[in-house]
Structure formats: C-alpha cells, structure tokens
Image (spheres, rainbow, N blue to C red):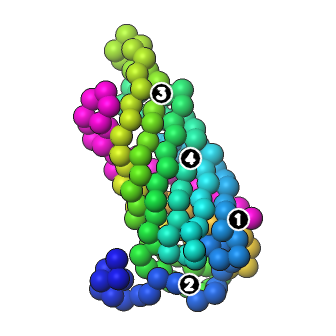
Amino acid sequence: MIVLQAILGAGGEAHAATEIGTSRAFGLGLQLGEPTAITGKVYLDGRVNAIDFSFGSYYNYGFANDIYVQASYHAHLVELTSGRGVTIPFRIGIGGFLNSGYWRFDNDVEDVVFGARVPFGLDFDLEKAPFQFYVEVAFNVAVIPFVGVGADGGIGARYYF
C-alpha cells in the first residue's frame, strides 16, 4: 500500500481538514442503487482503514432479494483533494455479501447467494459538517450455490457521530 501511495503521490493521513475518521469515527446513512440499503462505516485508527457495512434490498437481472447484507474492509489509498470545503479520498476494499431472494425468471426459485466483493469508491467528506457523500462500484464473485461474476454500485450519504 505504501508503494501505491508513493506512485499516486500522496500520503495516507488527512491534514485535519475533517473530523470524519478522527474524532467522529462512526457513520450511519442510506445508499441508493444496487443495493438500496442502510449503510454504516467505522474508521479504524485514523482515516486510512475502515469497515463498511450495509443491510438492504437488491434487484438485478431477474434476481430480487428479500435481504442483502455486505461487509467490506476499506483502505483509503490517496486523498485526491483536500480543501475548499471537502476532502475526497479514493478507496478500495475487499469483503463479502449474502443475498437471500428468488429468481423471478426461473419459476420464482428461492436461493441464498454468498460471495466476495471488491468495492472501489470516492468519498466526499465535508470539512465543516460531519457528513460524507460517496459513490461506489463493486465487483462481485458469487461462490455459493453457483460461481458467477457481477457488479453493483450506488451513491450514498452518512452522518458521523
């Protein structure tokens, strides 16, 4: 990770421009997209590492679910900008997901799908208020009950306590 930060030309820690991730480490909010979910994020020891989670609903290519749950570790690799009221870190992560739902185009077959996900995103951390807006795309690999690949994404906002 240090090599990637050096290549991208930035360090890991923020310049105390925002409270998010330092004095306010836990955020809770809403994500719209795939999935639409309640979302949370907990920073671990500063603004470089975090755990993100969501609980909601997902509909994609005929799969409609009753429950969608995911958790991912995030590494904030570089801050693209800091100042003018916002700090924008780029992040990448790794985690897992669980879908419980049915295939609408396969005679409504119930299924539980478990797999891995790799999210990429930009956070927009406000400097004068404890709000974070974000955009995220995740690549998914289902492993149970079948092997398959896909992608999801969304936009969201969190308030930090």
Cα–Cα span, label 3 and label 1:
29 Å
User: Between marks 2 and 1, how big is the CA–CA gap?
Assistant: 16 Å
Q: Which of marks 3 and 2 is nearer the N terminus?
A: 2
Q: Earlier in the sequence, mark 2 or mark 1?
A: 2
Q: Which of 85 and 125 is in front in this view?
A: 125
Q: Name the residue under label 4.
A: 54
Give the image location of residue 143, x and y in percent. 29, 36
Q: Distance between the residues labelled 3 and 2?
A: 38 Å
Q: Mark 2 points at which residue?
A: 14
Q: Is mark 1 on a helix, strand or loop?
A: strand
Q: Earlier in the sequence, mark 4 or mark 1?
A: 4
Quickly name the residue at label 1.
160
Tell me the element at label 2: loop
| Residue 5 rendering spot, x and y as whole percentages | 36, 83
Check whether the beta carbons of the residues at disc 2 and disc 4 lie within 8 A of each other.
Answer: no
Q: What's drawn in magenta, residue-wise?
A: 137-161
Would you call the spot at circle 3 few (<14 residues within 10 Å), some (14-19), or many (20 or more)?
some
Type of the residue with mark 2: Ala
Residue placed furthest toward the front = 45
In this view, 159 is above or below 11 = above
Could you give the CA–CA distance between mark 2 and mark 4, rounded to whole angstroms? 25 Å
